[in-house]
Image (spheres, grey):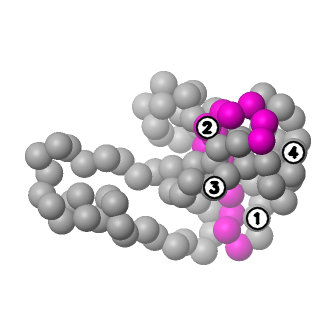
Amino acid sequence: MRINCPHCGVRGAEEFAYHGDATLRRPAADAAPEAWADYVYLRDNPAGRQRELWYHAAGCHAWLVMERDTRTHEIFSVTPARDVALAGGGDVA
Ligand SMILES: [Zn+2]
């Protein structure tokens, strides 16, 4: 798989580290223990399009949000996580 880093250009996937679902939201500090258990331990395993958090470990060290199809590995977008956070964590074109 080839990933187009917004800072470095197209690179091999071996330069990147996968860090899971980019849509998780941290519960409030006073949330129920069940909400914290879900946040820490439970993950969906969707077949299809999902937003993922990646780290360019052997490159620019940027955190990236990638929209990718888990069945085909087709990549629809790669966006610096900073831009996603500044946009409120919503969809980024
Ligand atoms: Zn990079």
- Tell which tag, 1 or 2, sits nearer the viewer: 2
- In the image, 58 versus 66, the foreground residue is 58
Residue ID for mark 3: 18
What is the secondary structure assignment of the residue under circle 1?
loop
Residue ID for mark 2: 63
Tell me residue 18's x, y (percent): 63, 55
First of labels 3, 4 by sequence position: 4
First of labels 4, 2 by sequence position: 4
- Where residue 4 sits, quadrant-wise, is top right
Tell me residue 89's x, y (percent): 46, 37
- In the image, 37 versus 50, the foreground residue is 37
Q: Is mark 4 within 8 Å of ligand 1?
A: yes
Question: Going 57% across and 27% down the picture, which residue do you hit?
Answer: 83
Q: Which residues are magenta?
A: 58-71
Amino acid bearing label 4: Arg
Q: Is mark 1 within 8 Å of ligand 1?
A: no
Amino acid bearing label 3: Tyr
